[in-house]
Amino acid sequence: MSARVDPRDTGAAGAAVAARVLELVRERSTAAEAEVVVRTGTSALTRFANSFIHQNVAEDVSHVALRVAVDGRVAATSLDGVADGAALSRLVDGAFAAAAVSPVDAGWPGLAAPAAVPAVDHWDDGTADASPDDRARGVAAFVAAAGGLVTAGALSTAALHVAFANSAGQAAAGRSTVATLDGIARTPTSDGVARASSVRFADIDAAAAAERAGHKARTAADPGDLEPGRYEVVIEPSCVTNILDFLAAYGFGGRAVEEGRSFVRLGEAQLDPSITIREDVTHPGMAGIAFDAEGTPRVPFDVVRDGVPQAILHDRRTAATAGSGARSTGNAMLGANPWGQVPASLVVLPGAVAPKDLVRGMARGILVSDFWYTRVLDPRTLVVTGLTRNGAWLVEDGRIVRPVRNLRFTQSYVEALAPGNVRAVGSDLALFPGGEGDATLVPSLHLGSWNFTGGAKG
């Protein structure tokens, strides 16, 4: 297979490569277990700064990952680039050589059995075919609509095909596209941010995004200090997806639970009743692939329902360890995995309150655009420290009264969503693409208390 990828390919080329790898494995050993993931596609980005395009890059993705288990000895290898016969033979030889010197893996859970994957196709030809000129026109629209403010950011497009096959008979194929605009408008004393992501490139309204970013930048200009303390907050979707990522990785991941690092207690009302979190690759606003790196289907299920944790995210290994009939939830990660189970296609169900009305519902609090540089201080309670970014405003009696300088916070993300602390859930839903073709889909939130501990410098 050539490294050059046709973005419209239905996945047949990847499936053929996966099948050939399994043939090569069988030629070496009919007793070996093997699974193959083939990822092909394109990824392109147009970056701009000081209101001018300064970088345009594109990449053809061609990645083959193989894992084999020979007499209980497990090893994985991968190949990037041209996947011709010679390269695939070297891939298989390398996997067997590594397995021969590996210790027996007592926790090897075996391969995924044949199972149907959800019938989703988060794909758009316009995104797959987007050209540098298409992206440049989007950037030009953003710059023009910023009203003379200095702008910076990037407009990207990606088209991914994934094929999976294993020696137990499971085979699956899927594809996904996503287009993302991430831009800021800037005054001498402030930045305003706007983001938009969609499976469809045509859905990205660059001019509207620039108007939002420009409005934020102008209203955030000349910010003043604010005393640290606990404040109500309205946090925009980028902040919510940050919270969700930490909850999934440190709380709902099977490895975190197994190692006693998780806060999750299934069946207890740990979060506010207004919070429902689903893993749902079938959601029409979602992007991503309907199976994981082990070939397990990603069937929709509730992670949290009405504030009550319902499920743990598992791959095959942690599901086998958990016992009690636990099964993989389709959260296996491709390749080496130091983090545990990877969240996929997570959705926080929206409420009925428009984002502007979330602000109107605050007595005295802070409207926050972004969190950044967030780090866990205590995994068990999920206390996280970080900073605000790209605009924060003091709100009194439902009205924005002035911009404030960036603030540092030290806050338990679990307590932030605890019963009684979620005042309202926004009606908006924003898509945030993640790694390996996955994404999150989240609304804005009005929270009753958030612990700001100082300014950005201390």
Image: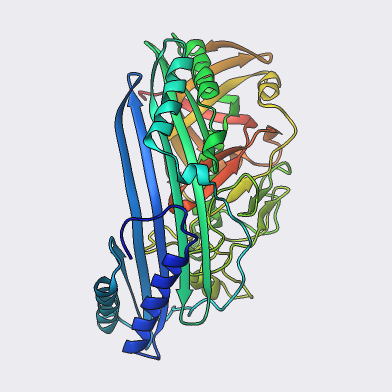
Q: Looking at this view, is 127 or 328 the one in front?
A: 127
Determine whether, in the image, residue 59 is placed left or right of residue 381. left
Residue ID at (46%, 32%) = 181
Determine whether, in the image, residue 356 is placed left or right of residue 315. right
Q: Looking at this view, is 179 or 133 the one in front?
A: 133
Specify the quadrant that holds the C terminus. Answer: top left
User: Outermost residue toward the bottom?
Assistant: 30
Q: Looking at this view, is 100 or 226 the one in front?
A: 100
Residue ID at (69%, 47%) = 276
Residue 62 image-quadrant placement: bottom left
Residue 121 position, x and y percent, is: 59, 55
Instruction: Using the rendered image of the protein, determine whether residue 452 is visible from the camera's viewpoint.
Output: yes
From what the image shows, is residue 427 above or below residue 334?
Answer: above
Instruction: Using the rendered image of the protein, determine whether residue 412 is visible from the camera's viewpoint.
Output: no
Residue 87 position, x and y percent, is: 25, 71
Residue 233 position, x and y percent, is: 60, 26
Residue 240 position, x and y percent, is: 56, 37
From what the image shows, is residue 407 above or below residue 78?
Answer: above
How many numbered marks are there?
A: 0
Specify the quadrant that holds the N terminus. Answer: bottom left
Determine whether, in the image, residue 183 is placed left or right of residue 208. left
| Rendered image coloring scheme | rainbow
Determine whether, in the image, residue 359 is placed left or right of residue 34. right
